[in-house]
Amino acid sequence: MNQSQQEFAIRVRELVVGFGRQTVLDHLSLDVRRGEILGLVGASGGGKSVLMRTIIGLIPRQGGTIEIMGQPTRGRTEGAAMTWGILFQQGALFSSLTVRQNVQFPLRENLVLSQELMDEIAIAKLEMVGLRAQDADKYPAELSGGMTKRVALARALALDPPILFLDEPTSGLDPIAAGDFDALITTLQRTLGLTVFMVTHDLASLTAVCDRVAALADGRIVAIGPMRELLQSEHPWVRAYFHGKRSQMLQHEMR
Amino acid sequence: MNSQPLLLATPSGDTLKLRPEGPWIAAHVSTLEALAGSVGADVGRSRAVTLDMSGVSALDTLGAWILEKLSRKAAASGEQAAVVGVADHFTGLMDEVRQVNRHTPAPAAAANPVLSRLGELGKATFSAREDIAIFLQMLGALFVSVWGVLRRPRSLRLTSLVYQLNRIGVQAIPIVALITFLIGAIIAQQGFFHFRRFGAESYTVDMVGILVLRELGVLVVAIMVAGRSGSAYTAELGSMKMREEIDALSTMGLDPVEVLILPRVAALVIALPILAFIGSIAALYGGGLVAQFYGDMGPAIYIARLHEAISVTHFEVGILKAPFMALVIGIVACSEGLRVKGSAESLGRQTTTSVVKSIFLVIVLDGLFAIFFASIGM
């Protein structure tokens, strides 16, 4: 095991992604260290989700390399659920399965284990994300927004993957639920030793949860570092993002 | 370091010492389950159980849960269970796992199969009544909005009507013509083949003409339209319902029936008779081609025979049914669309229901019309 494999969970080098003539990511490089929570910010439509989807292999890349846990990736791979869990923005729960079956799905597809153990693990995961065993037999359509996100998180964590991708985990949640969710992610990250890659617009969760924040503008990472450093950044877009009216208001509140 | 998980059980007096080793992670789950099962009996027999975790090299929720279950099993049979030697970076996980699965609700008792069948039958009967109510409600709402349009002709959504006419009328012509053409040809071929045996070949033309004009032309076209356009209506309105578009319309003070449903149903009522006419002509043409190439009957004779065999009455009987069938298809499709609930599955179920129900109702309606026309002598 060489050093980079020890230190970095995700290494992106010179990544180029485009659609037709439009280039969305232009020679982008990004390292995510093991065991950290990295927040990714960027303009709407600026390529944040494209970056995440390219790393997990949903979008083909035109150039560059991506290494996950020291292994180069090539598009969609077998057993990807063992490597990473993904929390999609709308939850992406399978609507024809109950909550319990949703959480069991990765277990059932990837492992051979008894139904009894599978039930216990599913309930354990649901309780770890703050749901009750009584919720296990509901269908996704019967869940509130916050519960959907929690179930989706439980499903993403079903196989205890080392890396967790979160796409706007707190969007659409009220501030209390968003705060709870932030706390939940921090707790789980510590308990399970996860590496978390989080796309978000929520300044509060950037400040509260993330170890480092990366800013994506013009198809590149223009600034990366702890929140404190990003606030000092001189890049015009980063300044506009963190020192705009809304952001200023929030930071005042926090001080 | 072990690459395979192990579980060493050493009984010393009354105490059973369990020492898990190696990676206790999900990837080795079948081994882990077997290991935990193999010591189960020993755990039940001994007085006290010590779980020494110092040999565990990797641990995840699944492994932690299997170990926790062992210690819980020991504790449950009144023994002393102790977990020792937990490495620092596993403490959090072990503590977390200790909290879970404490309040598992009792599984619901299996229902009596006979009773549940009876219950389903009752519910189905009850929902049939509801279906009729919904159908009548939609019919009433449609007539109310037609009345509104008659009073204020400007409130008719003309753009939408023309768009729907193009979609379900004009664009359906090729497939409708092709299928009715084939059906006409097949009927004529069967007629020639079977009537030839008793020298009644020329009556094939009578059969094709009457059958196509009175029944098959309109029925086949109505069934195709129910499958092609009815399902589209249901899916469209259903996804609008799911995305709250219909609620948005209502809150703006607009009536969804007037804006969305009336143009769609009106387009069907206008288009179906035209499609039925085109379909009938295509079927007669198909019959004519078979007459020439299979029945040795030239076009001139075919047309002359047709002229003798059919009258305007036959044509009227067929075409009069078309608008009513269109109304039934439109009402079923739209009301099923509005019944879609939040999930993708419900959209699929409602679309299926819409197509099945409208085809069924079209055939029932056709039967009723047959009785009606027979009794008035048409």
Image (cartoon, rainbow, N blue to C red):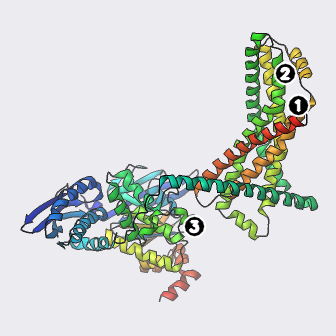
- In the picture, measured across the screen, residue B229 lies left or right of residue B305, that is left
Give me the chain letter of mark 3.
Answer: A
- In the picture, measured across the screen, residue B133 lies left or right of residue A118, that is right
Which residue does the numbered mark 2 point to in the structure image?
B206
Give me the chain letter of mark 2.
Answer: B
Type of amino acid under label 2: Asp
Marks 1 and 3, Cα distance to the nearest angstrom? 64 Å
- In the picture, measured across the screen, residue B360 lies left or right of residue A201, that is right
Q: Residues within 10 Å of mark 3 (few under 14, many from 20)?
A: few
Numbered tag placed on residue A44 in the rendering: 3
Give the percent coordinates (x, y) of residue A59: 49, 53
Give me the chain letter of mark 1.
Answer: B
Type of amino acid under label 3: Ser
Please say if B75 is above or below B373.
Answer: below
Type of amino acid under label 1: His
What quarter of the picture does the C terminus of chain B occupy?
top right
The secondary element bearing badge 2 is classed as helix
